[in-house]
Amino acid sequence: MGKVYLIGAGPGDPELLTLKAYRILRKADVVLYDALVNREILHFARQDSLKIYVGKRDGKHSLPQEEINELLHRFALSYKIVVRLKGGDPFVFGRGGEELLYLKSRGVEVEIVPGITSAISAPSSAFIPVTHRGIASSFAVVTGHPNREIKWEDLVNIDTLVVLMGVKNREKIARELIGAGRNPDEPVAFIEKATTPEQREVFSTLKEVAQNPPEVNPPAVMVVGKVVEIGAKVLCERIIGVTL
Ligand code: SAH
């Protein structure tokens, strides 16, 4: 029986892969990867390795999770090194836990290789620190997926809010947050395609996102909180070349 490595591929930039991920990828027999994994990273795998895409196709659904679990199990029975490569970190909204438990229940050895999550690296690539002395001493990462029930009122006192999978739902999220008691003037940033050459930042406020949401394209991370001003200031200075 082989071993399955649940590996985080980082947010996009291939250089943000860990050395451990790189080392294991180079000797993998099979690599199952998701939509958010930068294809350049696949070049690190052996040319003769099996590379299988299990992400969303043309807006259609990704392979059902049960099928991915079974595939991983089946490959572990016939190959030595099976890599399950996921965007960011495998345990941050990546269903890595489900794969771990399934494989363990089938007696398959599993190793987790953490990755740099977009939840923190997307903000930081836009010069937004999720914590900052005197400004933010707590942050929370939540899903903004329309199918998930979030108790937004519980998040009122968290200094920095990071929302993943929230682009489509951004208007409703902003409304919920204002309704729950967050300041409508609070700054908001969306960081699209973070750490890639196509990275784009959109700055706004909760009020504006709730009433007249700016255009944002997925994948993007939404950040709410005063720390957003730091990123806005630095990026603005970079553009106009003047210290504000
Ligand atoms: N496991 C991943 C998250 C998977 S959920 C991680 O740790 O990063 C998918 C969501 O992650 C997307 O909807 C988006 O909100 C965010 N995301 C992933 N990669 C991103 C990137 N390069 N730029 C912006 N957002 C990204």
Image (cartoon, helix red, strand yellow):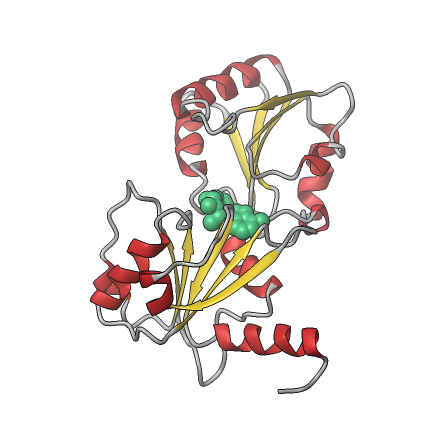
Residue 128 located left or right of residue 155 = right
| Above-or-below relation of 111 to 187 | above
Which residue is more in the foreground, 33 or 75?
A: 33
- Among all residues in the image, which is located at the extreme right? 47
Report x, y in % for residue 96.
Answer: 45, 37
| Above-or-below relation of 37 to 124 | above
Residue 22 located left or right of residue 2 = right
Viewport quadrant of the N terminus: top right
Q: Which residue is found at the position 67% from the left and 86% from the top?
A: 243
Q: Which residue is found at the position 64% from the left and 20% from the top?
A: 80
| Above-or-below relation of 130 to 53 | below
Is residue 161 in sight in this rendering?
Answer: yes
Residue 111 located left or right of residue 91 = right
Report x, y in % for residue 172.
Answer: 29, 54
Which residue is more in the foreground, 177 or 104?
A: 177
Residue 202 located left or right of residue 173 = right
Report x, y in % for residue 82.
Answer: 61, 25
